[in-house]
């Protein structure tokens, strides 16, 4: 874990769900991008059938409709593919604890144990590195770094933007503080 993340591999993830509480909600879309040496090299995404009709507010927020989810796999089928894609890479997400909580729900159902994986939160990291910003949404951070961000609340777009924001945060950390390894970054990304 002493490897410099800017030069190594990490996986940026995002999930979209039927609500915010994993105990009452289901994942409807999951996406990840693999970043190697600062470049997005591979992508994985899947729409996921939640087992019940979407609340209208979720369709309004994400653009995902019930028709789009017909015939899609359930999360129990998608999770093993997600885990294979992630491998042993560090997971990066904006509000990572939310995404990890959703993944943990299905992981416990399938494997009977908690999902434990090294992870970093771009929201908390940004708050520590850029304390003068007024807002820290993914859109706000993308705007701060001049990253174009068109489709908010679609998992692949959010995963890609999170990866690009994280790379910018890594550059700031390295140039300002000389910090670039997982353990150093993890300390700064705690809430």
Image (cartoon, rainbow, N blue to C red):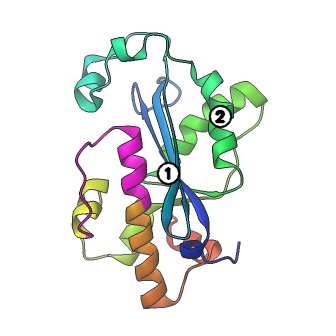
Query: Residue at horizontal 43%, vertical 65%?
Result: 166
Picture coordinates of residue 23 (x, y %)? 53, 26
- Give the mark, 1 or 2, whose residue is nearer the N terminus: 2
Which quadrant is the N terminus positioned in? bottom right
- Assign a secondary structure to mark 2: helix
Is 147 colored magenta in this rendering? yes
Picture coordinates of residue 30 (x, y %)? 49, 35
Residue indicated by mark 2: 81
- Assign a secondary structure to mark 1: helix
Q: Is residue 128 above or below residue 154?
A: below
Q: Is residue 118 above or below residue 50?
A: below
Q: Is residue 122 left or right of residue 65?
A: right
Residue indicated by mark 1: 96
Q: Is residue 147 above or below residue 185?
A: above
Picture coordinates of residue 169 (x, y %)? 41, 73
Q: Is residue 164 left or right of residue 119?
A: left
The part of the chain drawn in magenta is 145-163
Q: Estimate how packed mark 1 is, as few (under 14), some (14 to 19) or many (20 or more) residues with alpha carbons within 10 Å.
A: many
Closer to the camera in the image, 112 or 29: 29
Q: Is residue 182 left or right of residue 31?
A: right
Q: Estimate how packed mark 2 is, as few (under 14), some (14 to 19) or many (20 or more) residues with alpha carbons within 10 Å.
A: some
Query: Residue at horizontal 50%, vertical 67%?
Result: 189
Picture coordinates of residue 24 (x, y %)? 48, 23
CB-based contact (under 8 Å), mark 1 and mark 2: no
């Amino acid at each position: 874990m002493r490897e410099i993340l800017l030069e190594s591999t990490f996986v940026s993830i995002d999930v979209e769900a039927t609500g915010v509480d994993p105990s009452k909600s289901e994942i409807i879309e999951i996406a990840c991008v693999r970043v190697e040496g600062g470049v997005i090299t591979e992508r994985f995404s899947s729409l996921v059938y939640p087992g019940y009709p979407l609340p209208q507010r979720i369709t309004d927020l994400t653009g995902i409709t019930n028709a789009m989810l017909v015939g899609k796999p359930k999360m129990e089928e998608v999770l093993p593919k997600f885990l294979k894609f992630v491998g042993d890479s560090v997971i990066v997400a904006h509000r990572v604890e939310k995404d990890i909580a959703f993944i943990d729900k299905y992981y416990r159902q399938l494997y009977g144990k908690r999902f434990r994986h090294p992870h970093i939160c771009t929201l908390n990291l940004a708050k520590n590195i850029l304390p003068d910003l007024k807002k820290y949404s993914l859109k706000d951070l993308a705007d701060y770094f001049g990253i174009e961000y068109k489709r908010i609340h679609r998992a692949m777009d959010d995963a890609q933007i999170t990866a690009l924001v994280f790379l910018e945060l890594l550059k700031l950390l390295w140039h300002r503080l000389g910090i670039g390894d997982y353990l150093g970054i993890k300390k700064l990304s705690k809430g």
